[in-house]
Structure formats: C-alpha cells, structure tokens
Amino acid sequence: MKKHSFHIINGQFQVAHAKDVLQSMIISKIHFHQSEQFRIWETTGQEATHSLNRIQELKTEKQKLNELFEEAEKLNCEIVLNGTITMEFVPKNTFEKHLSANESVR
C-alpha cells in the first residue's frame, strides 16, 4: 500500500535537549496507551493487553535512555538524533495482522 516518510528529528543536541526531545516523545506515547487502556476498560470491561505491554516497554526504554544520557554527560559529549517516521496505509481488517507481523509498529 501507500507509504509516506517524515524526517522529524535531525541534529546535534546538548544532552539536556536530547533528553527533553526523546523523553517528551516517550511520555506522550505512554499517555496515549494509558488513555487507550482506560477507554477500552470503560467500554468493554477488559484490559488492553497491547497497551499495557507497550507501556511497560516504553518505561523500560525510557530507563535505558536515561542511562545513555548519564553516560553522554560523563563523557562530555553531545548527541546526534536522526528520526524518520514512516506512515503506511493498510486496509482496516489487516491492521492486527500487520502488527503481529511487524514488531516495529508501535
């Protein structure tokens, strides 16, 4: 199907600025999945397993990033960030299949 790519981060950052950028993205994704979990719980009475798992994964990644930021500070380094988002159109009935086949979709 149709794909689009957006280059959203490209540059060299002081550790504090890189930390702000990446942690803001992770926190936003955590809030998204918490809202999804709440919405699904309210409408179905069931847990959203994918969202719960993803929240945990994101928290783990946030901790790993914090360790890397500490290391960069100790080494007196700056951080280069490059990030591209790829958006792909898929038929509605194949989204779950696409998720399970492509673990990088999160």
Image (spheres, helix red, strand yellow):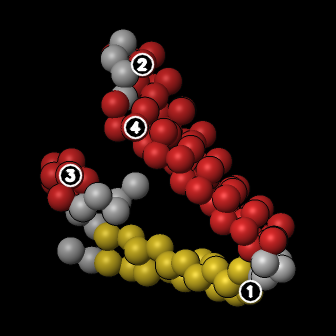
Which secondary structure lies at badge 1?
A: strand
Q: Residue at x 64, y 80 (%)?
A: 81
- Tell me the SS state at disc 2: helix
Task: Please say if 10 is above or below 87.
Answer: below
Mark 4 and mark 1 residues within 8 Å of each other at the beta carbon: no
Q: Which residue is mark 3?
A: 100
Disc 3 marks a residue whose amino acid type is Ser
**Counting residues from the N terminus, which is met first, the one under dot 4 or under dot 1?**
1
Classed neighbour count for the residue bearing mark 2: other residues with Cα under 10 Å, few (<14), some (14–19), many (≥20): few
* Tag 4 residue: 53
Question: Which quadrant of the figure contains the C terminus?
Answer: bottom left
The residue labelled by disc 1 is: 12
In which image quadrant can residue 31 be found? top right
Q: Which residue carries the number 2 mark?
A: 41
Rendered-image quadrant of the N terminus: bottom left
Q: Mark 1 or mark 2, which is nearer the start of the sequence?
A: 1
What is the quadrant of residue 17 in the picture?
Answer: bottom right
Residue shown at the point (34%, 62%) measured from the top left: 104
Mark closer to the chain start, 2 or 3:
2
Q: Earlier in the sequence, mark 1 or mark 3?
A: 1
